[in-house]
Amino acid sequence: MFENLSDRLSGVFGKLTRQGALSDDDIATALREVRVALLEADVSLPVARDFVKRVADKARGQAVTKSVTPGQQVVKIVHDELIHVLGGEGALAAMRIDSPPAPILMVGLQGSGKTTTTAKLARRLKEREGKRVLMASLDTRRPAAMEQLAVLGTQVGVDTLPIVPGQDAVAIARRAKQQATLAGYDVVMLDTAGRLHVDDALMAEVAAVRDATKPHETLLVVDGLTGQDAVNVAEQFDGRVGISGVVLTRMDGDGRGGAALSMRAVTGKPIRFVGLGEKMDALEEFHPERVAGRILGMGDIVALVEKAQETLEAEAAERMMKRFQKGQFNMNDLKGQLEQMLKMGGMQGLMGMMPGMAKMQRQMDEAGFDDTVLRRQIALINSMTKKERRSPDLLQASRKKRIAAGAGLEVQELNRLLKMHRQMADVMKKMGGMGKKGLMRGGLGALLGKGAAGMPGAPMGGTGGLPGGGPALPPGMALPPGLSGLGRKK
């Protein structure tokens, strides 16, 4: 999401931040490139034009000319304007799911991922907010639509309304609300049939469902890959049905992100969530300030911490933390860390949240680093005996050959794994005496390697990592050091 725009803007602002002073010509040249970058990212022309005008007005003011670091001040202005365009600071208001059962109406075009998004959101409400959720499919037209929602409900552990053949959408919606009331559910999610926004009959049907159920939230699910057409769809649905928010799907496949940048400015409706994959946990809240940070290569440490907290088991994390504080770190610990990285979205997901890591991520892609590297490392550890995992110093030539053969890999890859383990063990020993805070920051900082501070990839002049500032990861989460030791994709 936003990779292309992020790359272009990083190049533009990299030039600005290297200059000691900025002239009007410097700012004008940079903003011309920003405008082109926005248009290439499929941002609508009026939004791009207004954005550049507001930045230009502020960038030529006294705040920049008197700033010690004019280039970075311009970047801050762009950052603030991005937040404004995306919806404003703190724009993500909580969904209205009070006075149960709270109906949530899901609407959208055919093929936008509405049924899958319904299940993802139901899972999120159940696991994060402890709500009892009932899902009901109102799609009587698409073959097996109701069965699909029932299967997804089983996967995520959420109840679905039993199917009664012959009922229309309004009757199903009323039955769902009645069932939710009698059984004490907190939320009832109504998955309507996909429709073309020009289809008057189907639009009338969803309006009738709305009138019958009085939904607390009406969420429009649109495919982010459709670009500006997604914005047009949102305007059409809001005019005919009335929507309270938008969910953009398939944003993991869109390197431009123009729909997200135009949606709030054009429609006035907030983006509530973005879908970033097919898995049931691949749904994220849309925070304008965090997204703006990612676009400008500042990362999203808050999201990184939240992701770690979601995937870490508290008791296991505390046990691992105590081992780290004692300087104990064997192959079982390393395997746990590698598996944790995969759970948190792999290398690409983590690097996207790390401040100033955009350029390093591109270097990793060019060098052939990807998540298969982590899986090969895990395979090597699985090929070891329990004794060898506890005591890696036992590994001599004959054992190394057996382990590598067992994993179907070369001995060189095992040697790189052992080197990475030694580096990480050294970090744990040094940081163990500094308490939890120092240990977590040290473990994460080790991922960046030497010279990460002040990386050119950090346009705001950030550290590129957590040492020296920023929140620490939860206990038990320390990321592997030495990316150079991770091996290459064959």
Image (tube, helix red, strand yellow):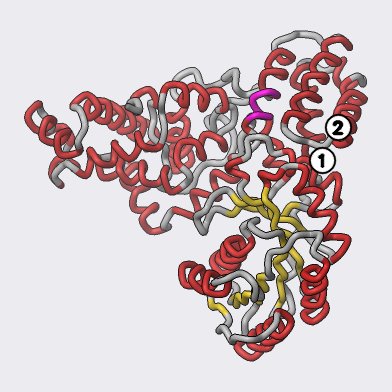
Q: Which residues are magenta?
A: 4-8
Quadrant of the frame with the N terminus: top right
Q: Picture coordinates of residue 333 (x, y %)? A: 30, 44
Mark 1 Cα shell of 10 Å, populated few (<14), some (14-19), many (≥20): many
* Residue in the picture at 36% in, 55% down: 316
Which of the numbered marks, if any, corresponds to residue 85? 1
Would you place residue 298 above or below residue 104 in this image?
Answer: above
Q: Picture coordinates of residue 97 (x, y %)? A: 71, 72
- Residue 235 is left or right of residue 364, and the answer is right
- Residue 332 is left or right of residue 93, and the answer is left
* Residue in the picture at 74% in, 52% down: 271
Question: What residue did someone put label 2 on?
Answer: 51
Question: Mark 1 to mark 2: distance in Å?
Answer: 8 Å
From the viewer's side, name the closer residue of 73 and 469.
73
Quadrant of the frame with the C terminus: top left
Element carrying mark 1: helix
- Residue 448 is left or right of residue 132, and the answer is left
Q: Picture coordinates of residue 75 (x, y %)? A: 76, 25
Would you place residue 213 above or below residue 19 in this image?
Answer: below
Examine the image and state in which quarter residue 196 appears: bottom right
The secondary structure that most of the magenta stretch takes on is: helix
Would you place residue 319 above or below residue 183 in this image?
Answer: above
Examine the image and state in which quarter residue 216 appears: bottom right
Label 1 close to label 2 by CB (< 8 Å): yes
* Residue in the picture at 39% in, 52% down: 317
From the viewer's side, name the closer residue of 130 and 251.
251
Examine the image and state in which quarter residue 117 appears: bottom right
Q: Which amino acid, mark 2?
A: Phe
Q: Is residue 18 magenta?
A: no
